[in-house]
Amino acid sequence: MALRSFWLEEVLTEDPDVAPPLEGEHKADVCIVGGGYTGLWTAIRLKEREPSLDVVIVERDICGGGASGRNGGYALSWWAKYLSLVKVCGEEEALRLCRASAEAVDEISRFSAENGIDAHYRRNGWLWAATCALHKGAWNPTLEALERRQIRPFRELTQDEAQAMSGSSKIVGGVFEAGAATIQPARLARGLRRVAIERGVRVYENTPMVRLRRSRPPIVQTRKGAVKAECVVLAMNAWSAQFREIFPAIIVISADMIMTEPMPERLAEIGWSNGVPIMDSRMLLQAYRTTLDGRVGFGKGGVNGVKAFGGRIGARFDGQTPLAADLERGLKEIYPTLSEARIVSGWNGPVDRSKSGLPMFGGLGGRRDILYAVGFSGNGVGPCVLAGRILASLVLGAKDEWSGAGLVRPPERSFPPEPIRYIGASLVRAAAAAKDRAEHRGRTPGAITRLLAGFAPSGVAPSGVAPAGVAPTKRKKPHALADSKGSK
């Protein structure tokens, strides 16, 4: 049993209900493997569009036990990823997806209110910050590209404004996007689970898939049973790395987080009681936020933490974060006035990082009856709302803007095989850390450090973007299933 995150432990004291494990042979129209945001939103969308569909979810732990209950709770749009989207699917589709992702953040609020989900939703925007002089302007290529289309989702702040908004004198600049929000992520996951069950979705927890039989129709085998379904949806996050088609497209690394004790009065004193979450511009990204009861959650992502050899996710991803001391130093470096804050919890979890930082959707091996969603790269709270729409359209064979979205594409072949991948990831991580250290000391990193760090997957600031004025690449085929000859 995995160590629960602070978020999930809080929810399970109020919601101890666990769906039974699957036993015996079952049939269904759709079997979704994974009970996180992607799987739950997909099930809900399918029941909205075709209420008579028999939809089954099998979840290895409990719904929300994976990334959906361990993440930082940042509900963000894709505006910061605009240049990466342009590279993947062209300018017009990038704009459409960015606008849809911004609307998805608001949709979480509406859906939660309509369905009685208390997800602690706070739409207070987010601050994309710089914590050293060399990081100021990391956002400029993105803002300049959007400005050419007269689109302005971000507002640039002076240093004084950024420090007042963040409550930290260590912030030297930033831009603010007003449409973002924070949530208590496990509350949203468990709320979606309840809604899915109320709408007739059969949910089986503590039911890991032990084998996917690629028969026609495909069969999901579990420890004590099986589900034969007309369509299987793999909504497995980092655990998707077990499939040969997906393994080259993602690298599995950990995201790590700590949580402080409540200190609302102290936060009010430093001016950080506004609920605004913050992400900096480091390669080893740091992200920090407050909670409704005045705690601070501080996390690290990027090419950081534990790495999975061969995509195998073991116990090292299901325990206390090994970076607790590093995270506490990071928190108190940004907020020296909180040096007495007591850390009460710390955890980690696997992240499915793609090279572009964007997800991929399509048919496994080109089949229409085995679908995947993978590569959310740590930004899934808002985008998973769209993932549910994309996967529902693919399941139903609809010809619409979702089945034809620019992110419906074959898995990228971005990362090398083992052991080169593991060794290379270690070298890139070391280079990224060295680059961050040099820049915070006011020095330009050396050429080799810059070269190796350049292999890191895209973070908040996109990597490898075209300079201003360079035309975007042509959009690829509308979706990965276009030439499929498989069933359904």
Image (cartoon, grey):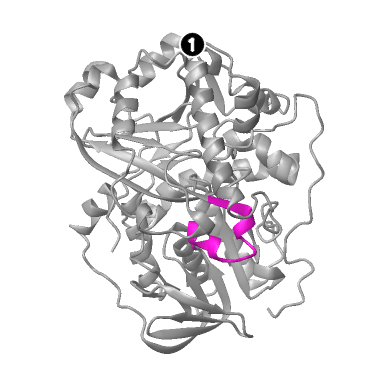
Q: Residue at x 29, y 38 (%)?
A: 258
Give the residue pinned by disc 1.
158
* Image coordinates for residue 423, horizontal then vertical, percent: 55, 45
* Image coordinates for residue 416, horizontal then vertical, percent: 65, 51
User: Is 331 in front, or is 159?
Assistant: 331
- Helix, strand or loop status at disc 1: loop
User: Is 481 in front, or is 464?
Assistant: 464
* Magenta-colored stretch includes residue 454: no
Above or below: residue 325 compared with residue 13 = above
User: In the picture, residue 261 is in which quadrant?
Assistant: top left
The stretch in magenta equals: 236-251
Q: Residue at x 54, y 12 (%)?
A: 443
* Magenta-colored stretch includes residue 246: yes
Amino acid at dot 1: Thr
Classed neighbour count for the residue bearing mark 1: other residues with Cα under 10 Å, few (<14), some (14–19), many (≥20) = few
The quadrant the N terminus occupies is bottom left
Most extreme residue toward the bottom is 25
User: In the picture, residue 189 is in which quadrant?
Assistant: bottom left
